[in-house]
């Protein structure tokens, strides 16, 4: 928005009407100065937000691929564990003959390291995920505080800029209602011109 406001004020400054009317020129010059100040503060706010919010968010986001990989490895270990557990249960349900007992023993031997791998990965995630989620607040709190401070500074400056502009452009003794009536009267005069067509 600030770029558009600067463009509008520059366009007004280059308008021939400003050359003919000194009062209009001083008003538009004051507006142009205010819009340039607003644009400068806006750019400063954008830079501050980039540095204190967006960059930390990107850094935090870079953690997720490794976290997602850990979750996927745990899920794969769980699937392997369930598959071998089902195999063991299938042999346990069969009649206890020599070949079945040998296959049961072999399936249990295959299951043991897979179960240990799954339990280790599961335990690691159960321990680390709560710490990871808990650390989000500590990580983002300074960023959000900085964002809020940047917004406060920006809007305080905007209040000051437009307050100064209002004092420069304000006609003492005129209320908003009087200004509105004057504008309506001028618009009525323009509408009354024969070159203005009724819609």
Image: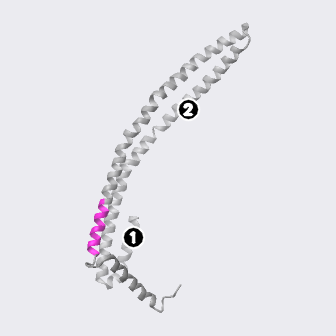
The vertical placement of 45 against 101, above or below, is below
Tell which tag, 2 or 1, sits nearer the viewer: 2
Q: Which is more toward the observer, 3 or 186?
A: 186
At label 2, counting other C-alpha atoms closer than 10 Å, the crowd grade (few under 14, some 14-19, many 20 or more) is: few
Which of 139 and 5 lies nearest the eye of the viewer? 139
Tell whether position 167 is magenta: yes
Determine whether, in the image, residue 144 is placed left or right of residue 122.
left
- Looking at the image, residue 93 lies above or below residue 130: above
| Image vertical order of residue 170 relative to residue 38, above or below | below
Q: Earlier in the sequence, mark 2 or mark 1?
A: 1
Q: Cα distance, mark 2 to mark 1? A: 52 Å
Q: Residue at x 33, y 64 (%)?
A: 38
Q: Residue at x 45, y 41 (%)?
A: 61
Circle 2 SS class: helix
State the residue position of label 2: 72
Which quarter of the rendered picture does the N terminus lie within? Answer: bottom left
State the predominant SS element of the stretch in magenta. Answer: helix
Is 104 on the left or on the right of 137, as rendered? right
Q: Which quadrant holds residue 83?
A: top right
The residue beneath circle 1 is: 7
Based on the picture, tell me whether residue 115 belongs to the magenta stretch. Answer: no
Please, which residue is most extreme toward the bottom here? 194
The magenta stretch is: 156-169
The picture places residue 124, in percent across and down from the top left corner, at 48, 26
Task: Find residue 155 and report its horizontal and vertical position in percent.
Answer: 33, 59
| Residue displayed at 39% across by 40% down | 137
Q: Quadrant of residue 18?
A: bottom left
């Amino acid at each position: 928005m600030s770029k558009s406001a600067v463009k509008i004020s520059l366009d007004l400054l280059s308008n021939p009407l400003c050359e003919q009317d000194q009062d209009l020129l001083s008003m538009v010059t004051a507006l142009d100065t205010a819009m340039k100040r607003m644009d400068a503060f806006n750019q400063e706010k954008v830079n501050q937000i980039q540095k204190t919010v967006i960059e930390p968010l990107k850094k935090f986001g870079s953690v997720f691929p490794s976290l997602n990989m850990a979750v996927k490895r745990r899920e794969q270990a769980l699937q392997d564990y369930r598959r071998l557990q089902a195999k063991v249960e299938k042999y346990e349900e069969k009649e206890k003959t020599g070949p079945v007992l040998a296959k049961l023993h072999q399936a249990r031997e295959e299951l043991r390291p897979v179960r240990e791998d799954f339990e280790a990965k599961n335990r690691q995630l159960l321990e680390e995920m709560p710490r990871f989620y808990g650390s989000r607040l500590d990580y983002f709190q300074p960023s959000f505080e900085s964002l809020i401070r940047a917004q406060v500074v920006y809007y305080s400056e905007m209040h000051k800029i437009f307050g100064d502009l209002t004092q420069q452009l304000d006609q003492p003794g005129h209320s908003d209602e009087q200004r509105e009536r004057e504008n309506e009267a001028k618009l009525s005069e323009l509408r009354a011109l024969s070159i203005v067509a009724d819609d």
